[in-house]
Image (cartoon, coloured by chain):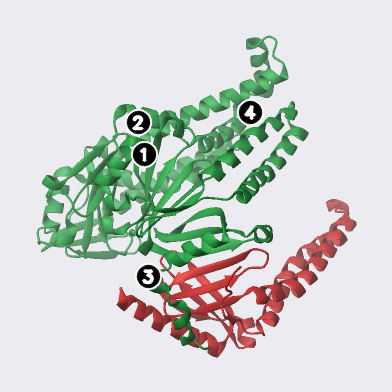
Amino acid sequence: MSELQRQHPAAALAKSFDIIRQNIITVLVILFIGGGGEQSSFTLYWLGGSFLFLLIWGIASWYRFRFRVEEGELTIEHGVIIKKKLYLTSDRIQVIDISAGVVQRLFGLVAVEVKTAGSTSKQAKINAISRQRAEELKRLLRSKENLSTEVGETNKTDEKIYALEKQDLLVAATTSGQLGVALSVVGGAFSQLDQIVSEEQMIRFVENNIPRATSLTVILATIIVALVVSWGFSFLSTIIKYYDFEVVVRNDELLISRGLFERTQLTIPFDRIQAVQIKEELLRQPFGYASLVIESAGYGEKEGNSATLFPIIHKHKMFEFIDEVIPEYHVQVKDRAGISRLGLRRYLLRMLWITLPAIALGWAFVPYGVFAWVLLVPALVLGYQQWRDAEVASAENTLVMTSRLLSKTTAIIKKYRMQATRITQNPFQSRLDLCNLTVYVASGNQGRSFTVRELTEQHAFDYRDWLAGDSNSQKDSTDTDFKP
Amino acid sequence: MRSIPKHTLSKSAVKAWRISIAVVLLIIFMIPVALGMIDVFWGDESNLSPWLIGALALVILIGGILAIFLIPEIRWQRWHYQIDEHEIDLQSGIFIITRTLIPLKRVQHVDTRQGPILRSFDLADVTISTAATTHRIPALDQDTADHVRNQISKFARLAKEDV
């Protein structure tokens, strides 16, 4: 491997697909907006042309991409127009990820991604080489004994593997909370439907199949069809996303891999974990299921901020799992502060203000919109439930914040991971001595915040001061230090 | 809210804010002006109601004047800050009062910055960044701003040595 070599030619394809995937939203927008009408053939040419261009670009970048390993140093030469050289020494390399996407699998190849701390890893990705060469590469790059790069099969003895069982995956897919996302996709598809089928045809279709269709049944049928189709979408996308989900616990890091068509691997060192969230989705909570999400600090990777630690787990197994995987996040809470009765009023009012415009709109514009008033019942029940769930609790050096928007979210935050706290109070709250408490933790390149609403001022400030640290008690005596 | 932080911003902040609001307002005011121009020159094709344009201009004008006189004053009265060895305590807001607490251990870097308007009043903003958030103490006298920045950076170093 000591002389410069190219990747497998399939890299050209993989590269073009990578570009398409990164710009998938742009592509979709062009397809939807440009599609239909007289310009459709034009759009087709346009798309074909850009695909050809991408392919040529892919081939060019494959041709220009060469790499070698010499004395534990990986050299990559690349760049179609501007030639760039990248040198990565093995003692700087933190993670070597081997993965296989659709293209790679077609050719029986793998992609190798080399990550160092800090820099983004895009350049240091070898898109397509044989598995054998990839293993050799890994061996060469880790031949020098360095402790921080323990990725691979070396520590097999200490590894614990947690896999998602098939029936749990089915449960996860069935109760997937991505309904909203899927609904909007289906909605978008519906709006494109009239370009394929004319309205007349649709009406005729409805008349033929539902003989005495009143407009009410049509509306109901539309809603039901939309729901079923969206559910199907979210079912499939969950299966694809979490197929063969696996968490491997190593000495100092977690390795999460998942995906049906494209295996995604994620490595999270334990000392990067900033907070853990237990999410009990609306559809899953009645069955006692929840999912676990961890927040981790920046890792040079875009999606490194918030990762699913386990997509679905039954509540009575959950604490066992937390105990074994991330034991420091299993805490026994001592003090807890719920929300007072005064707070309940504000939770209910808020739901009322949110639903009223929707009801008014429905009433005014949708046929049979009078029934929109029925929405008020679940909205108020949700408001009540939000109030019941909201809570701030603390254990030895851990803060537990529980709140609900739709899903109940329990955030477990270590005191020493807190980056900042914020208390806000609007004029209505100030009359009732209530306020909202927000805690920020680092996550990815930005932070993530957790908020509990309508705490009493007393509680909010107590928790804030408690979070701010140990030496906080003699605050008043020391702050004379500062004179502007 | 209880125990308001000790220090206030520079009093000339109010003037600086008034000017920057006025600048923004001037840009927004261009919208009805532009619409009016369209109406005057291409009136037959665009059929915009001149009354509507006038009303829009009036609303922007009245809202703008209120904003110029009230918002900077309220904002100045709300803004308080306090810095000690362990934490930075900020209070801000116009209608919604916000209290922010940043432990000095978490401070990654501090900047002072000033735009043209602040510079003409000899003011500067102090920006405090943590791994998750960015906070701003706006419109301090330049000397105070420098002092605050140095103080935070010194305290932050001390706090980190503790850990």
Between discs 1 and 3, the one toward the N terminus: 1
Q: Which residue is mark 1?
A: A311
Q: How many residues crowd around disc 1 within 10 Å: few (fewer than 14), some, or many (20 or more)? A: many
| Residue at figure coordinates x 69%, y 14% from the top left | A213
In the rendering, which numbered label is found on residue A470?
A: 3
In this rendering, which labeled residue sits more in front, label 3 or label 4?
3
Q: Is residue B103 left or right of residue A329?
A: right
Between discs 2 and 3, the one toward the N terminus: 2
Residue A1: % across, % down: 12, 55
In this rendering, which labeled residue sits more in front, label 4 or label 2?
2
Do marks 2 and 1 share a chain?
Answer: yes
Q: How many residues crowd around disc 4 within 10 Å: few (fewer than 14), some, or many (20 or more)? A: some
Q: Which chain letter matches label 1?
A: A
Q: Which residue is mark 4?
A: A194
Which chain shows up in red?
B
Given residues A162 and A244, the one toward you in this image is A162
| Residue at figure coordinates x 13%, y 44% from the top left | A132
Residue A227: % across, % down: 55, 27
Kindly identify the amino acid type of the residue bearing the numbered disc 3: Asp
